[in-house]
Each structure stands twice: as structure tokens, then as C-alpha cells.
Image: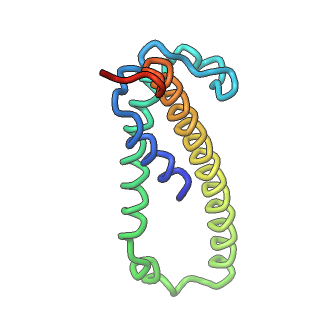
Amino acid sequence: MEQYFSATQKMEREVMFPSLLRGVFPQQEGAAPAAESRTDLYERYQLLKAIKPMVEKGLASVADQSPSGADADVDTSSDSNEAEDAQLEERLSHHLTGLQQVLTHLTRDTNALTRRYSQILEQISPSEGQPSW
């Protein structure tokens, strides 16, 4: 999770002119599956920016929920509770694994986009040896 937030913060700091990403497609090393290959880096940037608040909001809503409401129905039988608990643990594990995979993918895409943006800037900026005046 921290890697994802770190990557998105770095992207937001470094990508000052997102329009430079228009018409630029992912390089082969970090290329997306063929279905997404028609998406340029500008569209990906917009998508990554749109996803970040959703992730943050999702985390905040989980943190705001109090567990006290879940303990109200303690009267049920212990056998069914144990079965439900096992099922809940399995479902939670499944969803956390999925979340981890999605965040890893988003982090990889964000880092690749930031690297590519830096490469574009290096290509269009004057070399350090020449005066800028």
C-alpha cells in the first residue's frame, strides 16, 4: 500500500505537463496487455489520477467503521459462527490477495509512466552543457 501511495505522489510531483504524454504509448518492457495497447500514457495518467482518491476514500471508510455494531448479534450458535468465521477469513484472504495484485499492478504502471515522462523531458530539454539563454 505504501509503495502505491509513494509511486502516485512521485508521479504527481514529477508530471508537471501531462499533455506531453498524449500520443505516447507504453514501451515494450512495461507494456500492458494487447487490449490496452491503444491507450496512450495521457489516458493512463488520467486513469491513475482518478483511481487514487477512490483508494484513499476506500481506506478512510474502512478506518471509520467501528466494530461495535458487528458484535450486536452474539446469541447465535457457536458452530455456525465458527463456520461463518472460517468463510469470512477465506473471503477476506481472497479479497486482500486481489487488492494486493491490483495495487502492485497500479504501482508498476505508475512507476513506468513516471519513468517514461522523465525520458520525454530529457529528450526535449536542452543538454546541461549548453547555456539556457
Q: Residue furthest left?
A: 133
Choose top left, top right, bottom left or bottom right for residue 16.
Answer: top left
20 to 15, vertically: above or below:
above
Position of the N terminus by quadrant: bottom right
Using the image, determine if residue 105 lies above or below residue 84.
above
Q: Is residue 69 above or below residue 56?
A: below
Q: Residue at x 39, y 54 (%)?
A: 56
Q: Residue 125, can we see it?
A: no
Q: Residue at x 65, y 29 (%)?
A: 30
Q: Is residue 107 left or right of residue 70?
A: right
Query: Residue 57, image x and y in percent?
Result: 36, 55
Residue 28 in the image: state x and y as whole percent. 68, 21
* Occupied quadrant, residue 111: top right
Using the image as rendered, state which of residue 46 and residue 14 is in the foreground: 14
x then y, percent, for residue 99 = 58, 51
Compare residues 113 and 35 and report the one nearer the observer: 113
Which residue is located at x 40 percent, y 34 percent? 15
Q: State whether residue 127 is above or below residue 9.
A: above
Can see residue 122?
yes
Asked if residue 28 lies left or right of residue 123, the reply is right
Q: Residue 56 vs residue 86: left or right? A: left
Residue at the image position 42 percent from the left and 32 percent from the top? 47
Image quadrant assignment for residue 42? top left
